Image: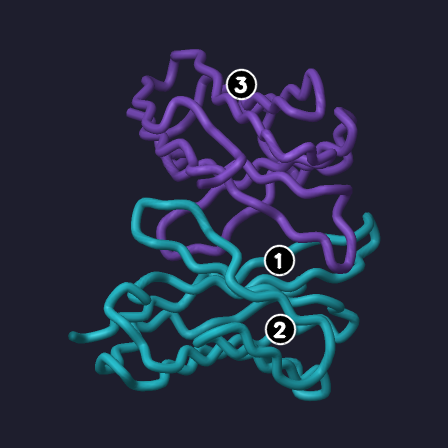
Chain colours: A purple, B cyan
Amino acid sequence: ETGVTQTPRHLVMGMTNKKSLKCEQHLGHNAMYWYKQSAKKPLELMFVYNFKEQTENNSVPSRFSPECPNSSHLFLHLHTLQPEDSALYLCASSQDRPAAQETQYFGPGTRLLVL
Amino acid sequence: QKEVEQNSGPLSVPEGAIASLNCTYSDRVSQSFFWYRQYSGKSPELIMSIYSNGDKEDGRFTAQLNKASQYVSLLIRDSQPSDSATYLCAVNGLGTGGFKTIFGAGTRLFVKA
């Protein structure tokens, strides 16, 4: 059973809605990540946080707004999304910041559908 | 653009056979390599990591790394229907902004009973 949890597991929202995705890790890790996974495409890294500080923003549109209040919790705030933003959003954590042999552990994901 | 390439499949093998999954990467300074398994509708789960050239075995799984040829492979011996999943190759390398993990799009494996 993964030590990374995500809620909600499924989300349907309109383009004018505002919603938030939540991720919590129980592994004592210091780094957390948001990824987007679209059908038949590689995982796309969105954001990286290390000790609550954002260390990576991979040119993500501003309609996605991350928040990391502490090393165990990570949020992704969504507003005015587009249908092409429909995807599986995965949270991951690792012991420390991205490094050569750092392994990431994934949560179950939130399946998002934007209508 | 650093890339990790995988054949999308599906790769179909009979139960009990060896499944061979391949991955090539473009960045020569890549340092560590991972194989994840992802069942349909589930999140990626780490199977193997490998950091140096050669083979690394763990149960029915063997990862093979050849840095000179820039490829990494995963062999699954005695394949079982429960091995049917998408296998993601991931590569860690040092870029201008620090280390990054680049994922391939995955190879779908189907093990026929």
Is residue B2 placed above or below A61 in the rendered structure? Answer: below
- Residue at position x 66%, y 55% from top? B101
- Residue at position x 67%, y 86% from top? B54
Q: Are marks 1 and 2 in contact (CB under 8 Å)?
A: yes
Side of A16 where B112 appears, left or right: left
Residue B71 coordinates in the image, percent (x, y): 60, 81
Q: Chain of mark 1?
A: B
Cα–Cα span, label 1 and label 2? 9 Å
Report which residue position mark 2 lands on.
B25
Work out whether residue B9 or residue A32 is closer to the camera in this orientation and state it: A32
Is residue B13 placed above or below A82 in the rendered structure? Answer: below
Secondary structure at badge 1 equals strand
Cα–Cα span, label 3 and label 2? 33 Å
Residue B100 coordinates in the image, percent (x, y): 71, 53
Is residue A32 placed above or below A102 in the rendered structure? Answer: above
Secondary structure at badge 3 equals strand
Report which residue position mark 1 lands on.
B102
State the image quarter where residue A88 is shown.
top left
At label 2, which amino acid type do we have?
Answer: Tyr
Q: Chain of mark 3?
A: A
Question: What is the quadrant of the N terminus of chain A in the image?
Answer: top left
State the image quarter where residue A58 is shown.
top right
At label 1, which amino acid type do we have?
Answer: Ile
- Residue at position x 63%, y 39% from top? A93
Q: Are marks 1 and 2 on the same chain?
A: yes
Secondary structure at badge 2 equals strand
Q: Are marks 3 and 2 in contact (CB under 8 Å)?
A: no
Side of B40 where A82 appears, left or right: right
Label disc, if present, on residue A77 of the rendered structure: 3
Residue B62 coordinates in the image, percent (x, y): 52, 79
